[in-house]
Image (cartoon, rainbow, N blue to C red):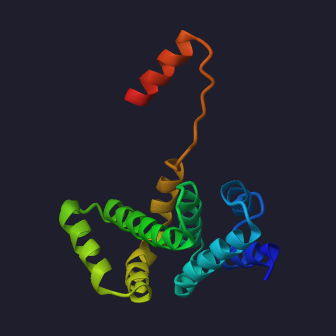
Amino acid sequence: MDLGSKYFEIKQFLSISDEKFNLDQKIENNFDSDNLKIEILGKIVQFIYYFSMFKNIKPFMNSVYNCIESTLDLRTESVNDFKELLIKNALMRFIQDYIDYAQLTQKTQILRLFSDSLDKLQIQPLIINLGLLLKPMYQDQEYLDRANKFQEVEISYSLNDDIEIKIKDAIDKW
């Protein structure tokens, strides 16, 4: 398979719009050889198919896509490291989202329980169990509206003078 067909498969499966889909640019910027790009895309395709049971829940698929993008921003030494990091990144993100959604107060105990599960369950049953837990969250319009207000925003600075540096420092401390 070529790169274009892999990108198309990912975009179609996750139902990502053309304007939001920039996986091709991230992979182009992070990996040199076409063989490596195809291997990485193969790992991404494997990963997204873990979520096939939840394919019709668009906000869930958007979250899966965001996990892929954020994992690509982290540099890895090998394709296998990338796959492992992708899975861990997604699971921890979804667990944290659920804890916030359910407004659970014993976060440390819950995270410990989930991290223990990582050692005991294979990835497919773990994702299915977690997905079933998350499904109501991604169908709750009030939660989705609230989450969209607080989406991650990347801010870049061109620090040309002392005032800009002071403003940046104040924002960072805030």
Where's residue 28, x and y in %? 73, 58
Q: Which part of the image, by quadrant, shows the N terminus?
A: bottom right
Q: Is residue 57 above or below residue 27?
A: below
Quadrant of the rendering where the C terminus is positioned? top left
User: Where does the image place residue 152, in percent across and percent down from the top left?
Assistant: 53, 48
Which residue is rendered at x = 28% and y = 74% of the image? 114
Judge left or right: residue 108 versus residue 153. Answer: left
Image height of 56 relative to 71, above or below: below
Q: Taking the image as drawn, is residue 134 in sight?
A: yes
Q: Residue at point 41% right, 74% down? A: 134
Q: Is residue 174 visible?
A: no
Instruction: Judge left or right: residue 142 versus residue 35.
Output: left
Badge count: 0
Foreground pick, 71 / 19: 71
Left or right: 128 in relation to 104: right
Q: 163 or 75, which is in the foreground?
A: 75
Quarter where residue 129 is shown: bottom left
Question: Which residue appears farthest toward the top when viewing the image?
Answer: 162
Rendered residue at 45%/77% (across/down): 135
Please tell me in which quadrant of the rendered image residue 11 appears.
bottom right
**Residue 162 higher or lower than 31, as above or below:** above
Q: Position of residue 141 (x, y in %)?
A: 50, 65
